[in-house]
Image (cartoon, rainbow, N blue to C red):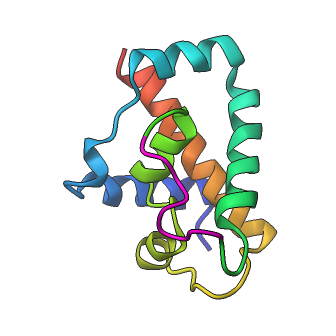
Amino acid sequence: MASQDSNIHKKLTVLRQSKFRSKFNLSQKDRDYIAAKGFETIKEHAFQFINTRVAPDFPKNDGKQTPMRGHPVFIAQHATATCCRGCISKWHGIEKGRALSDAEVDFVVALIMRWIDRQVYLKK
């Protein structure tokens, strides 16, 4: 069984090949926010957003619940196809109509944080 790191690396490689997903990048304002708050706080925000907006079996406003700007995690969700249950189903094979498991939430947050980490450290 492949490790989570390996799965994340493979998933990010596939997502970068999508014309739509690859257009998302953090702005300088997003980078400044991350620098001010720190990665642990951003990770806490990611858990909050995923657990409240995406993880439920039938999320409120599914397909429209993640803004396109306003927080680095929102940008990362669109870049990693974790913005709604439709994208999660299509790109990650996690079916709609049931709540995400703790392991699935952990994977989604790890994917988001890896994307953010790459944006901050590889695109200065």
Say whether residue 34 is left or right of residue 51: left
At horizontal 58% and vertical 17% (from top left) the residue drawn is 33
Residue 75 x %, y %: 45, 41
Residue occupying the far left of the picture: 19
Residue 17 x %, y %: 23, 56
Of residues 16 and 61, the one nearer the viewer is: 61
Residue 97 x %, y %: 64, 88
**Quarter location, residue 11:** bottom left
At horizontal 44% and vertical 70% (from top left) the residue drawn is 87
Question: Quadrant location of the C terminus?
Answer: top left
Specify start and end residues of the magenta stretch as a single range: 60-68
At horizontal 71% and vertical 62% (from top left) the residue drawn is 105
Q: In this view, does 20 lie above or below 46?
A: below
Please say whether residue 83 is one of the residues in the magenta stretch: no
Question: Quadrant location of the N terminus?
Answer: bottom right
At horizontal 46% and vertical 16% (from top left) the residue drawn is 29
